[in-house]
Image (cartoon, grey):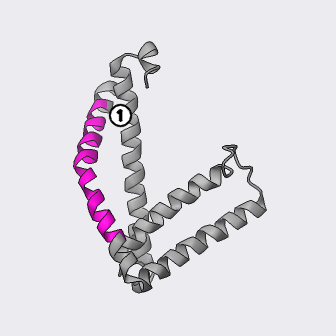
């Protein structure tokens, strides 16, 4: 960020930050829509009973597996995709989602811990949503 000050003025930096914030908000809304559709399509006992814990852990696991899928462990090189690595990675991902589903379903303290953690994270919405609204206003002003 410090290097941007030599090449960009403050209005350009705010504009770049606004685009990042708006993209993150759109991504969050899309993930929420997918999770709501999954809970509507899947049987009631699968995702609806403990929706917050299961969907939150699914999002965390998906984020973690996305990071793992792009980098080799400790090296930081781009991982070449072959059919074998794709199938292995997909199987490990689905297995981790399945294991997490059953852990939440049958181990009550994990469900409570995840719900407690998610409740504490909702405080950040008081910062995130106004910043996203401000980012939308800035993008509209920049492009009009």
x 36%, y 40%: residue: 21
Query: Counting other residues with Cα less than 10 Å from the Cα at mark 1, is it few (<14), some (14-19), or many (20 or more)?
Result: many
Nearer-the-camera pick, 84 or 144: 84
Above-or-below relation of 102 to 125 = below
Indicate the quadrant where residue 106 lies.
Answer: bottom left
Which residues fall within the magenta stretch?
114-138
Above-or-below relation of 67 to 96 = above
Q: Quadrant of the N terminus?
A: top left
x 66%, y 43%: residue: 76
Res 102 visible = yes
Q: Quadrant of the C terminus?
A: top left
Q: Main secondary structure of the magenta part?
A: helix
x 43%, y 22%: residue: 2
**Mark 1: secondary structure:** helix
Above-or-below relation of 16 to 43 = above
| Residue that badge 1 annotates | 18
Q: Does the magenta run of residues contain 20?
A: no
Q: How many marks?
A: 1
Indicate the quadrant where residue 55 lies.
Answer: bottom left
**Residue 27 locus on image (x, y percent):** 42, 51
Nearer-the-camera pick, 30 or 117: 117
């Amino acid at each position: 960020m410090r290097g941007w000050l030599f090449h960009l003025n403050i209005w350009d930096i705010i504009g770049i930050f606004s685009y990042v914030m708006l993209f993150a908000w759109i991504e969050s809304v899309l993930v929420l829509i997918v999770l709501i559709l999954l809970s509507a399509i899947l049987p009631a006992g699968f995702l609806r009973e403990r929706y917050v814990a299961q969907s939150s852990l699914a999002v965390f696991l998906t984020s973690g597996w996305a990071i793992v899928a792009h980098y080799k462990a400790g090296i930081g090189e781009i991982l070449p995709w072959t059919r074998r690595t794709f199938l292995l990675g997909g199987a490990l991902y689905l297995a981790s989602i399945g294991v997490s589903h059953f852990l939440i379903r049958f181990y009550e303290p994990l469900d409570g811990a995840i719900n407690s953690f998610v409740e504490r994270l909702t405080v950040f919405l008081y910062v995130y949503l106004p910043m996203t609204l401000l980012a939308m206003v800035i993008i509209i002003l920049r492009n009009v």
